[in-house]
Amino acid sequence: MNEKITFPQLAEALSKMTGCSHSTSEQFLKALFESVSEDIASGKKVNLDGLGQFSVNDDRTDIDWTPDQELAETINEPFSAFVPVELGEGITEEVLDGNVPIPETVTEEPEPKEPETVEEEGPASEPEPSEPVAEPSEEEPEEVEPTEPTEPADSEESEPADMEPEPEPGVTDESGAEIENPAVVYRERRRNPLLPWMFFLVGLLAGLTIGYIAGRCYFTGDIKSGLGIDKNTPDTAEVVEVLPVSATESADSVENVADSVAVNDTIPAKPAVPEPKEITDTITRERYLTTMARKYYGDFRFWIYIYKENISKIDNPDRIKPGTVVVIPPAEKYGIDINDKESLKLAEKKIKEFYQNKRAD
Amino acid sequence: MNGEYIDRLSALMSRDRKDVEALMEGLCTIIRDNLCEMNEVALPGFGTFRPEKKDEAIVIDESTGKSVLMPPSISVSFVASALLRRKINEPR
């Protein structure tokens, strides 16, 4: 990361990769770039597969390099998931008026993704008055640079100076060649001061969602109902679940199956026809006592009665096992009435008692 | 184009064409891998490939006036060496 690979290192790596001797790779590298240089100097366009095209620029002061498409794509692979996003006008104005990015951060940042959250906090939160002044001066060299001819005599010195300003996209008569697509002519800002706000917003949203789910779980007593999964339990599951129960029973069970299914499908709290037969339900991964209580009685808190009815089958209502068939007691048996506040209160009290006893054990 | 150089170099180095081909391919791979790791690759007498990370930025499309958030990218610049520049500037 951010190292400089020198000629000996390159030759070493090459000899390792190809199995040639070190001297051979050195010889190869020297010979290759010597002949390429000569071709370029003679005005040829040299196209090296895997690297790109080299050619002399118009005023014969520098080399233009167009990177190989594949090379550009490989290098930019980490960012391939991103696409340019058009911004609403309001956002732009805010950004332009408010915060101005600090230019140095470009070199500071070795990692492509992670540090952004941390680092970008900086430019957004300190809108120093000096920054707007610094910014235009930072952009100025970009415009001046292309017109400045490179002197051949002291090119050794001018070399580092060339790299400092970012080559303006689309400008070809500069030493650097761009890998980015230069299709859009644009004015560039180094940093997006909006990003910390975006991260902040996303974080806030995630926090709210988690808080909401956690809150629901706390009050309802189970995760699934907290996530709202019970709401869309398919009716088809009902048929499957009731079938094995009634199938084990007597011959006239077929009718009962049909009956109970019909009842379940329509209005839950209407056990009119199958009064003599008990309603049963099966615990699944998505169907808990609470979900059943809500389905049959209209409120999840009545789960305590289902539990009491099935106390022989359920050791711990917080650790129910999928596949357990439970009997849904008729509402009258425990005085369950969704419209009666007393009934709800009683259920709540019973739940409280139950957990108190449990803790005492 | 690569083939042309491979031929020329295999003659120059008096080595098998296959060997030179492998060297050529290896060189491209090494340069690419190093650039991917944000390493500069310096080729003395020729130039330096220098990768630079560009952060995401808001750019304004001047034709439409719309501002667009461009994703981050790595752009590689090639800086020709002093020697090569002198070479191309030589009057012929």
Image (tube, rainbow, N blue to C red):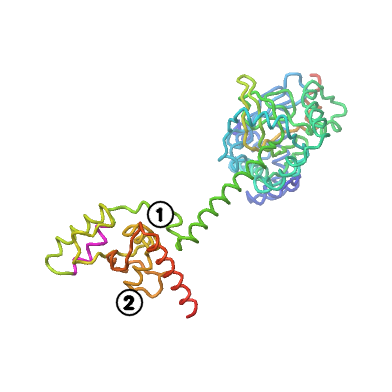
Where does residue A322 sit, x and y in percent of width and height?
A: 35, 66
**Of the pair A16 and A326, the residue shown nearer to us:** A326
Q: Residue furthest bottom?
A: A361
Q: Which mark is residue A336?
A: none
In the image, residue A273 lies at what x, y percent?
18, 59
Magenta stretch containing residue A277, yes or no? Answer: no
- Region in magenta: A238-248
Q: Is residue A351 toward the left or the right of residue A261 in the image? A: right
Relative to the observer, which residue lies in front, A115 or A176? A115
Q: Secondary structure at mark 1?
A: helix
With respect to residue A136, does A357 lie above or below? below
Chain label for disc 2: A
Query: Does residue A246 belong to the magenta stretch?
Result: yes
The residue that label 1 is drawn on is A229
Considering depth in this image, is B90 or A91 the residue closer to the camera? A91
Q: Which residue is mark 2?
A: A312
| Disc 1 to disc 2, C-alpha distance | 27 Å
In the shown orientation, is residue A51 left or right of residue A222? right
From this viewpoint, which residue is outermost toward the left?
A: A251
Locate residue B39 relative to residue A325 in the image: left or right. Answer: right
Q: Dividing the picture into quarters, in which one does residue B9 lie?
A: top right
